[in-house]
Amino acid sequence: MTFLSRRLRRRWLFPALIVTVGFAALAGRSYADDVAGSDDAAEPSADAEPVSYYNDVRPIFQQHCQGCHQPAKASGEYVMVSHDALLAAGESGEVGVVPGDPEASELLRQITPNGDDPPAMPKDREPLSADQIELVRLWIATGAVDDSPPSNEPLIDAAHPPVYLQPPVITSLAYSPDGTLLAVSAYHEVILLNADNGERVARLVGVSERIESIAFSPDGSRIAITGGSPGLFGEIQVWNTASRELEMSLPVTYDTLYGAAWSPDGKLISFGCADNTVRAIDATTGERRLYQGAHSDWVLDTDFSTDGSHLVSVSRDRSMKLTEVATQRFIDNITSITPGALKGGLIAVERRPEKDELLVGGADGAPKLYQMYRTQKRVIGDDFNLIRAFEPLPGRVMAVQFNHDGSRFVAASSAHGDGAARVYQTDDGAVVSRFAEDRGPLYAAAFRRDVPQVTVGGLSGTVSTYNADTGELIREFMPVPISDAASLATGPAADATAAPQAETDEATAPATNN
């Protein structure tokens, strides 16, 4: 194989971004096409364009390797999130990268095919293309130089959690099934809080800068998180709730992932993608079990039927679709397909506990309840599956969630700098309580299972918990520690995993951003 052409090389280059971690959309032929020609790599010529670690090599490792080789999950005791870590040895004692000596570099041996046999790494994933392997080899051969710009540091990972100068936007909230934990999205992390007092219990720090959804498994033992970095990569993470250990980090597509949901038996995790697809993976191995491309715009949320046989997805394309899990076959549009019947995209969906009924929210501001399965022939113009439309909220409905038995639900909205939340009776549509109308745009809502409490969050970055019956504020607080510029100049921020955040009452609640 000859040295990569300048034209091909340019496909790997992209401007340095002021983010901590990002996956690049890498070019390259498939492994099957390249394996036959992977052994005849030539030495770089004297006038060859140098290989950049930051622009060329680092994105390959981010896309294919860092899911299993990061501080939160260091497979083989080898970490690949920094240049220094690459030069260290792993569990085997062999040094990963030996500058100037590709033959002595264990990392290169692990990613290179051995004759007709596929490479050992990435484990259980698509192998690197021959072009990508050649880039790594040439980088090592020319000294394995670190050309990362200063703005690329410090890294954000489990050993270096985020430091906040202002509250992060809250895009997702989730209570554990037993009601003891509240999970809150932040920047590069999910914060686990004591649901009774708001005290921080743990910080689950991963590589995704944006967190879009959080879902506890049915038994509460694991947590699925979707997110990514817009335009760079999507990722699904699976954490062990008790040990706080990252069990899986799976890169999927080249944009953010949305709407994680567990199948009722806890064996599958579904999610939506910005490439208009809905997917489901094996919750243990990460193997893809479902792929459906019937939507024509981003898929923002998903949920399973009561028996796990069907998957529901909602999208910006104004539709709610039904897919059969076993066959991956599109079955039906649950919502009306008549142009103009729906006034905008759909954003959130949740199945009613123990019933195949679906609560959906979207751009028209009105929560709606649908039956999952059609029982009569579709007629153009009908919306037969609609059971009930509820009193609209101002703006877009961004989040919906039922209480433990499905008799009530909470909905939260965002409207041009404002927001609102309401609790409804499911069967008669009555509004039980109204609240959070002065808290700015709301993007997340969660109904606690063991007591009548609901929690909302959004642009202001505050976590606000209310009495579901009365709408009275119970507590409000910041889920993350906020530092000032002076503290950053003098030293690291105080550890946030154990220190409780002071509660505020309604009179002293911090002002929201409008």
Image (cartoon, grey):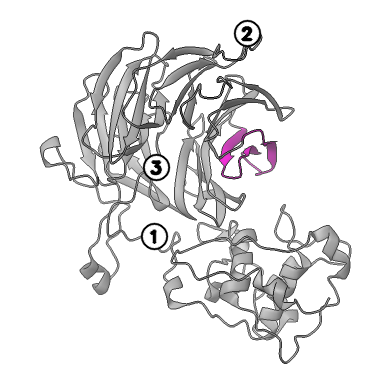
Residue placed at 65% from the left, 80% from the top?
A: 51
Q: Position of residue 507 (x, y in %)?
A: 10, 37
In space, the residues marked 1 and 3 are separated at their CA atoms by 19 Å
Residue closest to the far front: 339
- Residues 257 and 367: in front is 367
Residue placed at 39% from the left, 23% from the top?
A: 366
In space, the residues marked 2 and 1 are separated at their CA atoms by 51 Å
Determine crowd level at label 3: few under 14, some 14-19, many 20+ residues with C-alpha closer than 10 A.
many
* Tag of residue 248: none
Mark 2 or 1, which is nearer the eye? 2
Read off the residue under disc 3: 171
The relative height of residue 232 versus residue 260 in the rendered view (above or below) is: below
SS for callout 3: loop
Read off the residue under disc 2: 375
Q: Position of residue 151 (x, y in %)?
A: 42, 73
Residue placed at 49% from the left, 32% from the top?
A: 345
- Which quadrant of the figure contains the N terminus? bottom right
Any magenta on residue 161? no
Q: Position of residue 327 (x, y in %)?
A: 74, 28
Q: Amino acid at mark 1?
A: Pro
The relative height of residue 185 versus residue 115 in the rendered view (above or below) is: above
Q: Earlier in the sequence, mark 2 or mark 1?
A: 1
* Tag of residue 161: 1
Q: Amino acid at mark 2?
A: Thr
Q: Amino acid at mark 3?
A: Thr
Highlighted range, magenta: 267-295
**Number of numbered tags placed on the structure image:** 3
